[in-house]
Image (spheres, coloured by chain):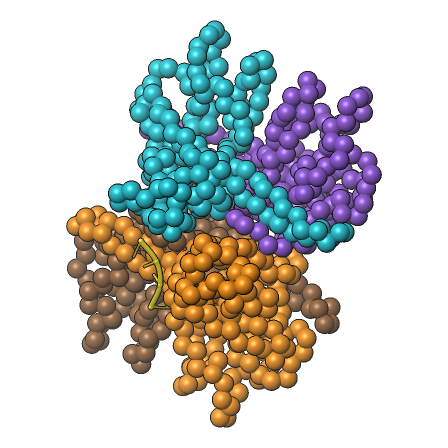
Chain colours: A brown, B orange, C cyan, D purple, E red, F yellow
DNA sequence: TTTT
DNA sequence: TTTT
C-alpha cells in the first residue's frame, strides 16, 4: 500500500516468441514473455549505422497473465509498465544466480486489430489496455498453497518462501529456467 | 539517434553504499551505485505489515559518472532515469552469467543540502539535476582504446567487444564483479 | 478498467503554497496543490544562466487528498504521478475556459522527516508513499449526490455532468477558481 | 543542462487531425498535433460502460516538428514523451488566458507501415523513433529574430519575450488559437 | 527470439 | 548495503 521509493519501468517492444503461461498451485496464472527493444545510432568514428537489441523478461500475474497469454503472440508489439524485480535462484551446481524481471502491472497491445500473427478470432481484443488490480502488489499465493514453488521469489513480495529450492530430486520445470 | 521501442526506467531510492568510480582507458568515468527501493504492504491473510527491498545496480558514464561519484554518498536519496541493459559476463568457471543494470541518463539528488552523509563542502551541489549529453547513447569507448575491459558490455551498445574476458592471468578487478 | 492509450505524468517539485482541501457533497476530499518544477540552462548566445519555473496544478482525491492535505506544506518536495485532465469551466462572462490539471494517483513525500516547513507533529509521516485505490479511476461522486458541482468536470471521467454551471445566482466558490 | 525537479509526460494516443506545421522567423519548424487518449470503465453504481477521451495539445520543435509534420496523419497512433508547459496568451478582449501543452522531446510512430491513414509514399518511415537533440531545452529562437511571435511563450524557456501580444491590429493567426 |  |  505504501512504499518508499519509486521503481518503475516502461517498455514498448515486440515479443520474441509466443508467451508462456503456467498456473500456480493457487490457481493464479503466470505468463512470461521476452520483449525486445532496440536502438540504432551512427558510430561517431566510422559513421556506420549500429543497432543493439535489448531483451527484457516480463512477467504477468493473474488476470493480466491470462490476457497476455491469450492475446499476445510472437511479434506482437506491446506497451508494458511494471517494476523491476531481481529474484535469486540456484543453478544445477547449487550456485546462486540472479534474474531481473519486469513485473508488469499494466499492458496495452499496440498492434492494429487483425494483424497479430495469426490471431484474429472472436471478440479479438484488438487494442486495449489492462491494468493489474491491486496496484502491483498482487500476491498470487494469498489464497493458500502447500507446495513449494521456485517461481515464488518473483511473485511473493514477502520473500517468506518456505522450502524454497528443496533439496532432493523434486522435479520442477520452473527450476530449469535459464535466464534469457 | 533513432530507436524502435521504448526502454525506460525511473527510480527513486537510497544508496546502499558509497558510489564506486573507475576510469576507462579512454579516460571516461564509470560510476556504479547500488540503489534500494522498498515497498511495504499488509498481508491480506494475517494483516501483518510486510516489507520488501529491491536493489538496483545503476551505472553512470562520463560526466554523470563524475557528478555521481563526487556528490552521492551511502544513504543519499536520488532520482535516476535510464534504460535497462543486460550484459553477459563469464564467471570463474567460464559459465555465462547475466547482469541487468540501469544505465542512467538523468540523475537528481533529492537530499536537502547539507544532510548528505558527511558531504557539505564548497559549492556543494545541494539538489540539482544532471542529464547525460548525447541522449543516453554515449559510447565511452568511442575515442579509441586498446586494452580489454570487462565493463565494456554494459557501455558499448555495439556489443562488438574485442578480447572480452581474456584467458590467462590478466588481473582485472572488474572481472570479479558478482552481481549484487 | 481498460483503456486505450497512455496518459501519464511524473513530477518532482515543490509546493508553492499550502494545499487546499475541500469536501465534496459525497464526503470525499479534494486537495489542490500548486507544484513548481524548474529548469536552468545557459543561453547559447550569451552564455547567461537562465531559469524557468513551471507551475503545475495537481489534484488529489479521496484518501490521497486527505494525506496530501495533512502532510504537505508550502515548500514540500514531492513526487507525483498521475494523468492529464483538461476541464472546461465558464468564467464570469459565460465564456468557456479550460484548465489542465494533473489528477494524481500516486504521491511520495521527498523531504526528510522534520524539515517540512513547520510540520512535525505526531506520527509525522515523514517520507512515505501513497497510492490511490482503484487505479486512478476513482469517481468521488459515485456515492450519490444531488447538488451540482463545478469541480465535477475534473473528477468525473464520464463527463456527464448534470446542471453544470447553473444559471442563476448559485453561489459556489469553486466557480471562482482562476487557473494558476 | 541542470534542472530542479522532474517534469515528464508520457502519452500514447491517436491524432485527431493532421498535424499543423509552421515555421518560425528563425527557420525552425513548429508542429502542433491534437492527441487523444481514452479510458473506459464500468460505472460502480449502474454497471454501465463509460468512456472518456482526453485531448492533449502536443508541440514539436525543429527536427521533431519536421518529422511529425511529414509522417503523422489524422488517426496515427503515436508515443510522445515530453514536458508540461503552460503558456499565457491574451484573448481578443485582452484577458489573460492559459494553455497547457506537452512539449515533445521524443516521438515514436506506432502504426504498422502502410496503415497510416492514406500515407504511404516513398521511404515511408514506417515505425521509428526520434529524439530531440539538446535534451528538450531547445530554444528555436536562439539564432536571432526580430519579429514578435505569439508562439514564443511555448517555446522560449527564458520567458523573456519582447513585444508579446502587440497592441494594434497586428494580424497573427497564432493569436487566434483557441485551446482545443 | 522480435521489429524495420 | 539504504531509508522510515
Going by the picture, which residue comes out furthest to the top? C168
B79 above or below C130?
below
Residue at the bottom extreme, as displayed: B168
Q: In this view, does D22 lie above or below C47?
A: above
Quadrant containing the C terminus of chain C is top right
The answer to which of A149 and C132 lies nearer the viewer is C132
* Figure quadrant of residue D93: top right
Task: Give the side of residue D43 with respect to residue D141, left or right.
Answer: left
**Residue drawn 47% across the image and 16% down it:** C164
- Residue B48 visible, this orientation: yes
Q: What residue occupies the far front of the structure in this picture?
A: B122
Looking at the image, residue A13 lies above or below residue D70: below
Confirm whether residue B106 shows in the render: no
**Identity of the residue drawn at 67% across and 51% down:** C49
Residue shown at 55%/17% (left/top)? C91
- Comparing B169 with D162, the one in front is D162
How many tags in the picture? 0
Residue positioned 40% across, 86% down in the render: B93
Measuring from the top left, give residue B29's x and y in whole percent: 57, 72
x then y, percent, for residue A43? 69, 68
Q: Quadrant of the N terminus of chain C?
A: top left
Residue D57: image location, x then y, percent: 61, 35
| Percent position of residue C142, x then y | 34, 25
Amino acid at each position: 500500500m505504501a512504499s518508499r521509493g519509486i521503481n518503475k519501468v516502461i517498455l514498448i517492444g515486440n515479443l520474441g516468441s509466443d508467451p508462456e503461461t503456467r498456473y500456480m498451485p493457487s490457481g493464479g496464472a503466470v505468463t512470461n514473455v521476452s520483449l525486445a527493444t532496440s536502438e540504432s545510432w551512427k558510430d561517431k568514428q566510422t559513421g556506420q549505422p549500429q543497432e543493439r537489441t535489448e531483451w527484457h523478461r516480463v512477467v504477468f500475474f493473474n488476470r493480466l497473465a491470462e490476457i497476455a497469454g491469450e492475446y499476445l503472440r510472437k511479434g506482437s508489439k506491446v506497451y508494458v509498465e511494471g517494476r523491476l524485480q531481481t529474484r535469486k535462484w540456484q543453478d544445477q551446481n547449487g550456485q546462486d544466480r540472479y534474474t531481473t524481471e519486469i513485473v508488469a502491472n499494466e499492458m496495452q497491445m499496440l498492434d492494429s486489430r487483425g494483424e497479430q500473427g495469426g490471431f484474429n478470432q472472436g471478440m479479438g481484443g484488438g487494442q486495449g489496455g489492462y491494468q493489474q488490480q491491486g496496484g502491483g502488489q498482487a500476491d498470487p499465493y494469498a489464497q493458500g498453497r502447500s507446495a513449494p514453488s521456485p517461481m515464488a521469489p518473483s511473485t511473493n513480495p514477502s520473500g517468506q518462501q518456505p522450502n524454497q529450492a528443496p533439496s532432493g530430486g523434486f522435479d520442477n520445470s520452473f527450476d530449469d529456467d535459464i535466464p534469457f
